[in-house]
Amino acid sequence: DCFSGLCVEKRCLDSSKPCPNACSRRGSCIFVSQTTGATVPTCSTLNPLCSAVCSCNAGYFGKACDLTASAYLALVSFRELLCAKVYESMALEDVTLESVKSRLQLVGSILTQREQVSDAALRNCTAALVETVEESPTLACQSGALSLAVSALSSVLEKGAGTLDESLVTVIL
């Protein structure tokens, strides 16, 4: 059993990490260092410190360059609206373990496609996350809620490292 899936004479061969859906043939696959963010010439499947990412052709967006400009903008707007509503609904909701877990999971899910998260969405989702933990620390550390909080916080930190280029949205419009 080879990790790379490429074996010759019972020996595992290394290969490059693939880009999602081969960038839908609407972009090129590039390799990026996860420590510096710089482009690197190669990215082995055995190297945990690099990623294969798509560099999309003009007019295409998304992890696999599979979104048109209008679809991309619709998803950015949708995530922005979701984060705003999660934050607004906090004042209306009774605080229980289940509501805390649900909110933490929702924030983490909204932020998973970080290239579709605007700065406004990030602010609202981060505020919902922080206020949830600050206002209910005991509940946020109970029965599965802590791992959801850590996961959501990781999404916030990852998004902060690769923020949406707001000027790109302006150019598309």
Image (spheres, rainbow, N blue to C red):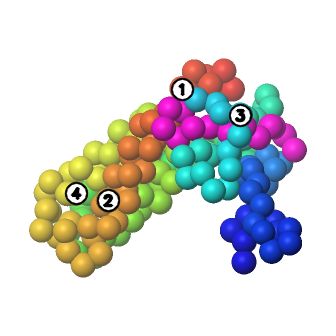
Q: Please tell me which of labels 2 and 1 falls first in the chain.
A: 2
Q: Which residue is mark 3?
A: 41
82 relative to 97, above or below: above
Q: Give amino acid for label 2.
A: Val
Q: Contact (CB < 8 A) between labels 1 and 3? A: no
Instruction: Identify the image quadrant of the C terminus.
Output: top right
Secondary element at image label 4: helix
- Mark 4–mark 1 distance (CA, rounded to whole Å): 27 Å
Binning the other alpha carbons within 10 Å of mark 3 as few (below 14), some (14 to 19) or many (20 upward) gives: few
- Start-end of magenta stretch: 25-37
Secondary element at image label 1: helix
Q: Please tell me which of labels 1 and 3 falls first in the chain.
A: 3
Q: Which residue is mark 2?
A: 150
- Mark 3–mark 4 distance (CA, rounded to whole Å): 42 Å
Q: Contact (CB < 8 A) between labels 2 and 1? A: no
Q: Give amino acid for label 4.
A: Thr
Instruction: Identify the image quadrant of the N terminus.
Output: bottom right
Q: Please tell me which of labels 3 and 4 falls first in the chain.
A: 3
Q: Is residue 39 left or right of residue 37?
A: right
